[in-house]
Image (cartoon, rainbow, N blue to C red):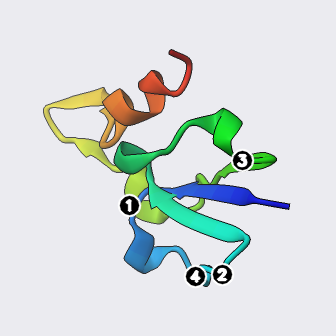
Amino acid sequence: MKTQILVYKKSNCGFTETSDLTIREFCKALAFDAFDLTVIDLQDKYLWKSDYTNDKILQDHADISSFGK
């Protein structure tokens, strides 16, 4: 089964890429229908940081918002 894991920063994710597991950062996501399963990993503590001048928007807001399109 081909699986794609989407992470905030690949260097912080703790997963190891294999022939059946593709790890991509949010901004480099491949088409969901190219995989049997796509998992969005929201565990990276740096994902939940925001710009101190606007605490309503997460660091990767644009990339996460694009998943629905």
Q: Alpha carbon of mark 3 to alpha carbon of mark 4: how far?
A: 21 Å
Task: Give the camera-side residue of 66 and 19.
Answer: 19
- Disc 4 or 1, which lies upstream in sequence? 4
- Disc 1 or 3, which lies upstream in sequence? 3
Q: In this view, does 35 lie to the left or right of 62?
A: right
Q: Is residue 50 left or right of residue 8?
A: left
Per the image, the residue denoted by label 2 is 18
Q: Alpha carbon of mark 1 to alpha carbon of mark 3: how far?
A: 26 Å
Residue 35 badge: 3
Q: Is residue 61 above or below residue 1?
A: above
Per the image, the residue denoted by label 1 is 46
Per the image, the residue denoted by label 4 is 14
Assign a secondary structure to mark 2: loop
Disc 1 crowd, CA 10 A, few/some/many (<14, 14-19, 20+): some
Q: Residue 62, can we see it?
A: yes
Q: Alpha carbon of mark 4 to alpha carbon of mark 1: how far?
A: 14 Å
Q: Which residue is drawn at 43% across and 24% down?
A: 66
- The x, y position of residue 56, in whole percent, is 34, 25
- The x, y position of residue 9, in whole percent, is 39, 65
Q: Which residue is drawn at 50% across and 15% down?
A: 69
- Disc 3 or 2, which lies upstream in sequence? 2
Quarter where residue 59 is shown: top left
Marks 3 & 4, CB-CB < 8 Å contact: no
Disc 2 crowd, CA 10 A, few/some/many (<14, 14-19, 20+): few
Q: Which amino acid does label 1 sit on?
A: Tyr
Q: Which of marks 1 and 2 is in front?
A: 2
Q: Which residue is drawn at 56% across and 36% down?
A: 31
